[in-house]
Amino acid sequence: MGKKSYRLIAWGVIWLLTIGSLRATLLAAEICPASSKEELHLSAKAAANWIVQNQSDNGRYLYEVKMSEAGIPIISDGYNLVRHAGTTMALYQIVEEGEPQYLEAADAGLKYLLDRSVGNEEILAVAEGSADAKLGTASLLAISLIKRRAATGDKKYDQTLEMLGNFIITMQREDGSMLYLWDQQTASPVPEITSLFATGEALWALASLHNLFPEKGWDHLAFRTLDYMATQRDEDENVWPRPWADQWAAYSLNEMSEWGLSEIHIQYARELAAQFGIAVRWESQRNGGLDGLVHSPEPIAAGQGTWIEAIGMLHQLSEDEPRLEDLRIPLQERLLCAAGRMRVKQTIGTGTVEFDGGWFTGGVSRVDGQQHALSGLLFAALSLDEQGQ
């Protein structure tokens, strides 16, 4: 056999390996379980049931549970006030979507937060004991109260909302970035410490507060932070790949959809859509066999839930924003694919009633998994309204 033949065989092997690698990664088949609107809504309700069934009398949620090899649940002692606020917000979201039976549990979660209020006559934040107050907790508390107001028509927390808004703008720097911690001893922000998550949470809260209280004129402050997130945050926080896959940014863009978004904001929305779309595609190719071997470990439910939230918000934005009309159908396809996969992974009929309706990854289920999935599944169900499904 001549040298030419050996070269042809070598190139053939290389091409076969390349094609096989692509088939197992980028070109792998996707599995996207079909779901009706009713199925998605029922899945969201099951997630809400998990939260409520595992809530303590004082309003505190079960934070994390791990199932031992013997099937015995081991409850974590840890807790996170930011995630508590996010879970409360998710319960108010489902109340707003016509499920009033969750209002009592949401109000109990709200009381748990308000019992930990700190600040002064002008600002309000939330912290455990003497600890620093976190921006994210106050921001998601504000969203919770806004969702409660929308669901019930009750305006009794309007002053509290204004005080939360005052706290958020106290944490904003001139370039639009947000400081993360507020020192109770000095009654001032802790310098130089920021948070990727809290910045987006604060923007969504600030934008929502402006839509509720437009006379406050907080829209220019919200634009300042959106501009920062769209152009500078990734560099400051050393994020890669860019942009940071921030579902709170998607919430914020949708909240600000009628404000006159700039081309920079529209491009940012497109980049976010691409990031979350890639995440969903990669996860939907996790189908066992060789496809499964080349994928990283499965993300926790909280992570997958944020993808659905983000795509749901971007899909809603595309329905109102003509410059994103071309993304409307692709975003809905990604949304329903991710939500369908989430639905079939949900633990239903396990025989352990209090843990039915949750998601376990590596035997562990955490409350923010139920929180983010609940919100995302609601958005996926809503996306089917236009088709009457």
Image: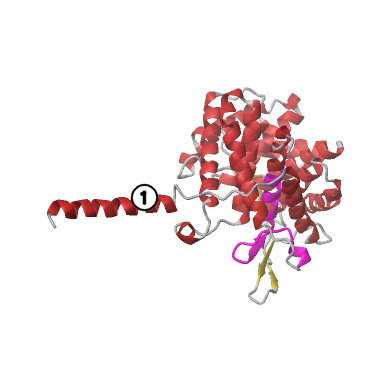
Q: Is residue 371 magenta?
A: yes
- Image coordinates for residue 108, horizontal then vertical, percent: 83, 53
Which quarter of the picture shows residue 317? top right
Q: Quadrant of the N terminus?
A: bottom left
Farthest residue in the bottom direction? Answer: 70
Of 217 and 149, the residue lying toward us: 149
Q: Which residue: 71% across, 34% down?
A: 387
Q: Which residue: 55% across, 46% down?
A: 280
Q: Which residues are magenta?
A: 352-378
Of 70 and 200, the residue lying toward us: 70
- Image coordinates for residue 326, horizontal then vertical, percent: 56, 28
Of 125 and 223, the residue lying toward us: 223
Residue 203 shows in the view:
no
Residue 113 shows in the view:
yes
Q: Is residue 321 left or right of residue 93?
A: left
Q: Which residue is mark 1?
A: 19
Q: Which residue: 44% across, 47% down?
A: 26
Q: Is residue 14 magenta?
A: no
Farthest residue in the left direction? Answer: 2
Q: Amino acid at mark 1?
A: Ile
| Image height of 318 relative to 33, above or below | above
> Helix or strand or loop: what does disc 1 sit on?
helix
Label 1: few (<14), some (14–19) or many (≥20) C-alpha neighbours in 10 Å: few
Q: Quadrant of the C terminus?
A: top right
Q: Is residue 363 left or right of residue 230?
A: right
| Image height of 254 relative to 51, above or below | above
Q: How is the image coloured?
A: secondary structure
- Image coordinates for residue 3, horizontal then vertical, percent: 13, 54
Of 148 and 299, the residue lying toward us: 299
- Image coordinates for residue 110, horizontal then vertical, percent: 80, 49
